[in-house]
Image (cartoon, grey):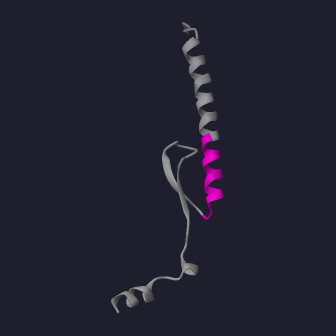
Amino acid sequence: MFQDAIDFYKPDKGYETVTWQVLLANEMSFTSETETFDSEAEASGAVADNLELIDLKIDQLMKLRDRISLQQIRKVVD
């Protein structure tokens, strides 16, 4: 009888809300944050885009690092 009561109060599958959550890097501060998506395909696309953005930023930072490390230190007299 107790099991019947539990089964009676279980939510219908039609009323369940399913979302997908992924950890992404914030585009401005590059801190991590959790984002929620309505479909697995959207979540997968967001992860792929985020990884592409991270790779681009790494490439930009490596070029900047090379420019800074190879620069001549100039003496400036006013």
**Would you say residue 44 sits in the magenta stretch?**
yes
Number of marks drawn: 0
User: Residue placed farthest to the bottom in the image?
Assistant: 1
Give percent across and percent down for residue 25. Answer: 54, 45
In the depicted view, which residue is nearer to us: 47 or 70?
47
> Which secondary structure class fits the magenta region best?
helix
Q: Who's the residue at 52% across and 42% down the image?
A: 30
As drawn, 34 above or below 38: above
**Would you say residue 19 sits in the magenta stretch?**
no
The stretch in magenta equals: 38-51
As drawn, 1 above or below 67: below
As drawn, 25 above or below 59: below
Give percent across and percent down for residue 17. Answer: 55, 73
Q: Who's the residue at 53% across and 83% down the image?
A: 12
Give percent across and percent down for residue 66. Answer: 59, 18
Q: Who's the residue at 64% across and 34% down the image?
A: 56
* Quadrant containing the N terminus in the rendered view: bottom left
In the depicted view, which residue is nearer to us: 69 or 47?
47
In the depicted view, which residue is nearer to us: 74 or 8?
8
As drawn, 8 above or below 71: below
Give percent across and percent down for residue 49. Answer: 65, 46
* Quadrant containing the C terminus in the rendered view: top right
Q: Who's the residue at 38% across and 90% down the image?
A: 5
